[in-house]
Amino acid sequence: MTPTFKRTLCALAAASLLAGCASQPPAGPALRFAFGGAAPAGYTAVALDATYDAARGFGFEPGSARGSYFSVDLPEGNYRVTVTLGDDTQPGVTTIKSELRRLMLENVKTAPGQKLERSFIVNVRTPQIAPVDGVPAGEVALKAPRETVTEAWNWDKRLTLEFNGARPAVRSIEIVPVQVPTLFLLGDSTVSDQPGEPYNSWGQMLPRFFKPEVAVANHAQSGETYRDSLQRRRIDKILSQMKPGDTLLMQFGHNDQKQIKDGKGGPFTTYKAEIKTHVEKVRARGGLPVIVSSMERRRFDDAGKIVLTLSDYAEAARQSAKELGVPFIDLHAMSQTVHTALGVEGSKAAFALPAPDRLDNTHHNPYGSYVMAKAIVLGMRDAKLPVARHVVDDFAFDPARPDPVAAFAVPPSPGRTQERPLGDDSNRAGSAR
């Protein structure tokens, strides 16, 4: 680790400790890196073959294709990342994702010789839970090896950026800790950061639709329920970082159905009770809880009509929002509109296809999750959530006229898997028309 980088990193860590572990580090010194060639004054030069080294504290992740993943050690918190894009002699098309495939910038074009700055906010976290009022110290009970190995980038003490695109052209980056509103996410596999193609979730696409004025912190996890959130202390981790005015979107339902089969609850009993517990905890920290109904699975009858599988849970979510006086986003209804608009065959293009004969009718691919993320943003606007003020200016979406798949051009990440996300055994891949 260079002396300058070490001093700056120590300053960031000290700022985090002084501010209290329950909040992100305040505005402080910036880290600046320049890639390839000589670095401008104030920047650390990074060779394109510089592999990440713990002693140095930054570098490209081992195995990265031409330096696709760049990581830097940082305390947990929210950071504004400003990238300077462009190439001296060639046009560029750059897409940037953060941590575990969270979409930040989409196909930004630069002309030869152009220098273009773009900024976005990245949330970095660890499993440790700092004590705050009503929340004892501890840590999140991560799933091993899924979260400790496959999804480790979501929990390590690093900020990781994926440089992607038809011809990525990243000249330099600047990383600064910031105090901004945080939009927390909590839910199941249709929300959580999926580690490899072809799987994706709306939570991974959501940051793309916000200006660099708000952080999206995705704490959802595959195979889980409201009950798991309590038992594994995911909600406690969120509460330990929540500031007054922050927002939490909560969407469970797919896996909660298993509790009926196991005789351990139901939509209008334990499910609603667990929603209430979450709402009360968030309100106690000054946050705004928002209930989201689960998106519907892709299932059609012989006449091409949507077959509903989550109606009771969607209704229970709606009732809970009304009874508790909290905002509600009806993703269950909007997803049906999207599926109907795409049709029996067309909707296949929105769901993961890990193998030629294994269409997954529950979990989206990047196109499907991109569309669902736009539905969530529309729901946030319709609910007049304060955080919706930070949505990008060019946002537009109509569930009855979803973006055509031919127009979708977010490049896939390098990693691919055939391992299905955890949970939702009731609808195995390929089981529905």
Image: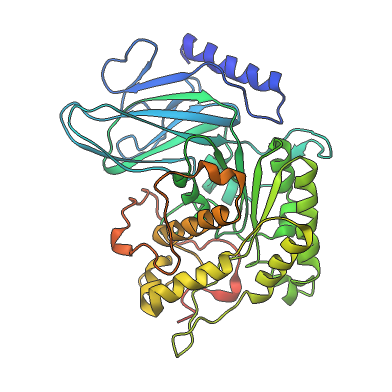
Where residue 294 appears, as percent x and y from the top left, is 60, 65
* Among the 4 quarters of the image, the one containing residue 387: top right
Above-or-below relation of 54 to 386: above
Which residue is nearer to you in this view: 292 or 381? 381
Q: Is 257 on the left-hand or right-hand side of 168?
A: right
Where residue 161 appears, as percent x and y from the top left, is 43, 36
Where residue 325 appears, as percent x and y from the top left, is 75, 57
Q: Determine the residue positioned at 58% across, 19% down.
A: 12
Q: Determine the residue positioned at 62% across, 68% down.
A: 254
Above-or-below relation of 96 to 269: above
Task: Return the residue found at the far right.
Answer: 134
Which residue is nearer to you in this view: 65 or 300? 300
Which residue is nearer to you in this view: 342 or 415? 342
Image quadrant in which the C terminus is located: bottom left
Q: Determine the residue positioned at 45% across, 29% down.
A: 81
* Among the 4 quarters of the image, the one containing residue 393: top left
The color scheme shown is: rainbow
Q: Determine the residue positioned at 73% across, 37% down.
A: 240
Above-or-below relation of 176 to 142: above
Q: Is residue 101 shown to the viewer in this render? A: no
Where residue 74 appears, as percent x and y from the top left, is 55, 26
Q: Is 165 on the left-hand or right-hand side of 394?
A: left
